[in-house]
Amino acid sequence: MTLEAFQPSEPLTLGVELELQLVNTRDYDLTHYARNMLRLMAQRDLPGSVVPEMTDGMIEISTDPCHDWSEVAAQLGQIRDALVQSADKLGIAIVGGGTHPFQQWHQQRIYDKPRFQELSQLYGYLTKQFTVFGQHVHVGCPDADTALYTLHCLSRYIPHFIALSASSPFVQGQDTAFDSARLTSVSAFPLSGRAPCVLTWAEFERYFDKMAHTGVVQSMKDFYWDIRPKPAYGTVEVRVFDTPLTIQRAAALAGYVQCLVAWFQTERPFAPSEDDYLVYSYNRFQACRFGLEAVCVDPETGAHQALRDQLLGTFEHLAHFAQTCQATGALALLRAEVEEGRNDARWLRERQAHENLLSEVVRQASRRFRMA
């Protein structure tokens, strides 16, 4: 098995994928309605796609290639509206968030698709525990080497992406004390984590050939890295986001990634090396555990800095690129919430503190998804 050729794409174009929860409207637990939802959605003329995911209580929606965050928001909004209408016909609801707060993994069913069944045979109970929900953002790259450069630059900002999107504080009825508990499920897979620090596509092809020779991987789909190249699309794919509770926030996060990539590909500000990854896992953990209250370490200087301060400084630095990418509104939305110390994990905890009933929290989250 050889690595497919990298297909250049229009630089800075965006594609967004969202994994979404299907819940009943009785107690708002996950419900096995993926096949019914897909049947109804197949009758609609929509941008992007709606496809199954690992288990029957989840689906994935995606956009077509977009040029800016407002186009992402428009496409996701159109798909969302169709989802809500279909869900209403079925008597169920659609919810964002990185985890369902109280579902029991052993009650989930693997969707009847050959790849999912193969993964279930290989990974056992981990596949049902993979009933977690993420947002993936693709950004277009003009060539393969630029894609790898972009990937390693983006790796510096993994804590930003985690903290901004964190929406999975509850697992199996318990507050985990993490803002993003979802990523612990992803980390259980043997080919998760960070990509190897290779800087040219020729070197990456040699790495892939060695991995394929072992029989461990057959395609890029077998890597569950936080960020990975997607040769068939000509993109770099950021995979650490929890699914936000709203379409607007999902689009704003894509706009932030686009602004960063515009900076990287225009000015080439960094010279990536293995040393960049010295504290990668530690900073990733900090963002998962503490969200916007995390403290991150600079691998070069050893300096510790509040993640919130890093974010605000980065937003300021990206102001020019935000104008170029027509993403000023996206950064303004995110900035306001960072200044207030708010993310979706905090919203969920506040609702639970008020209601003391997770099923009511999910009901309110489903209302929020359909309106914003």
Image (cartoon, helix red, strand yellow):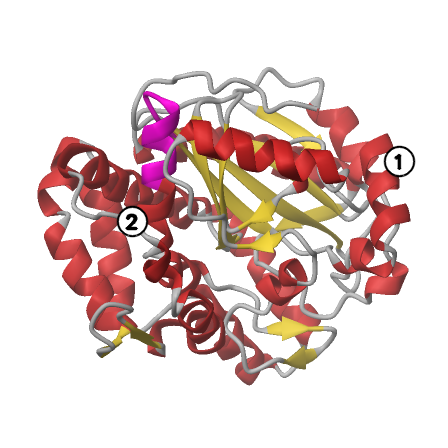
Decide whether the magenta segment is chiefly helix, strand or loop.
Answer: helix
Query: Which residue type carries mark 1?
Result: Asp
Report helix, strand or loop for mark 2: loop
Q: Is residue 107 left or right of residue 357?
A: right
Q: Residues within 10 Å of mark 2 (few under 14, many from 20)?
A: some
Question: Which residue is at the front of the view, 227 or 203?
Answer: 203
Q: Is residue 158 visible?
A: yes
Q: Position of residue 278 (x, y in %)?
A: 38, 67
Report helix, strand or loop for mark 1: loop
Q: Tell me the quarter of the picture where residue 145 sits.
A: top left
Q: Is residue 50 magenta?
A: no
Residue receiving disc 2: 272
Distance Cα–Cα, label 2 vs label 1: 42 Å
Query: Which residue type carries mark 2?
Result: Pro
Count of number-bearing discs: 2
Question: Which residue is at the front of the view, 208 or 19?
Answer: 208
Q: Is residue 36 left or right of residue 15?
A: right
Q: Is residue 81 visible?
A: no
Q: Tell me the quarter of the picture where residue 62 sits.
A: top right
Residue receiving disc 1: 112
Q: Position of residue 169 (x, y in %)?
A: 57, 73
Question: Which residue is at the front of the view, 313 or 45?
Answer: 313
- The segment highlighted magenta reads 140-150
